[in-house]
Amino acid sequence: MEKNELRFKGKKILQDISVKERLQIEAKMQESLFKSEIWKSAHVVGVTLSQTHEWSTEPIIEEGWRTDKKVVVPKCIPESREMEFYHLEKYDQLERVYFGLREPKPESSALVKKDDIDLLLVPGLLFDDKGYRIGYGGGYFDRFIEGFRGKTLMIASERQRYTPLPFEEYDQRVEYVLTESGIHSTYHF
């Protein structure tokens, strides 16, 4: 299957999960994440601001704030397809940009260096057991993960597992996948 077909498949999987089931799955994911050593040892956590069809990251952001973690969120630079992360201390530091995405306002947020991020939560539509993923097609996370020294963890349901996924030389693996059944390392494959 081509990557565009796989993106469509991943979006359909997410759309077909009922609100009730979505909340149950998210609760299991959050419980596993917050009990994990990966979460506990991270001081600076990079996380996207989820859209309605994605797994909610607001409880993760708020738990980060509650437990005195430095929460950082991405701002995309479309010209270069790169991202910069900014410290998020409250939601009013955000603005709506293209496609309804919420991003930090640089004038009201502090830029954080890539090497200062301990844990990066990565979105995606499908994943495989080796840590390859199908994202939304912009390549922003692949570019950011290349050379990243912190831990990478994708948030996904077991339904989003699709093995094996096609990958290209620039595709970057994530080290862990968080699903409703816990956190799974991808580096044993």
Image (cartoon, rainbow, N blue to C red):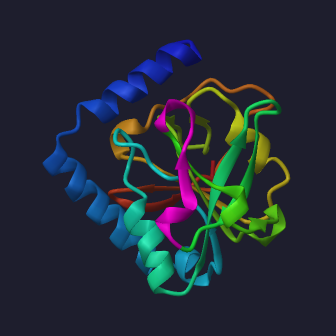
Where does the magenta region start and end?
90-100
What is the quadrant of residue 170 in the picture? top right
Q: Residue 25: tell me if it is visible.
A: yes
What is the quadrant of residue 139 in the picture? top right
Q: Nearer the viewer, residue 150 or 84?
A: 84
Q: Position of residue 152 (x, y in %)?
A: 64, 58
Total marks in image: 0
- Compared across the picture, whether 170 is left or right of 140 comes to right
Residue 183 in the magenta stretch? The answer is no
The residue shown at (36%, 62%) is 29
Above or below for 19 versus 125:
below
The residue shown at (53%, 38%) is 128
The residue shown at (61%, 83%) is 41
Q: Position of residue 70 (x, y in %)?
A: 62, 77
Q: Nearer the viewer, residue 168 or 81?
A: 81
Q: Position of residue 12 (x, y in %)?
A: 33, 25
Residue 94 in the magenta stretch? The answer is yes
Q: Residue 187: tell me if it is visible.
A: no
Outermost residue on the left side: it is 20
What is the quadrant of residue 104 in the picture? bottom right
The residue shown at (22%, 55%) is 23
Q: Nearer the viewer, residue 138 or 159?
A: 138
Outermost residue on the front side: it is 107
Above or below for 125 versus 86:
above
Q: Position of residue 138 (x, y in %)?
A: 66, 29
- Compared across the picture, whether 17 is left or right of 188 comes to left
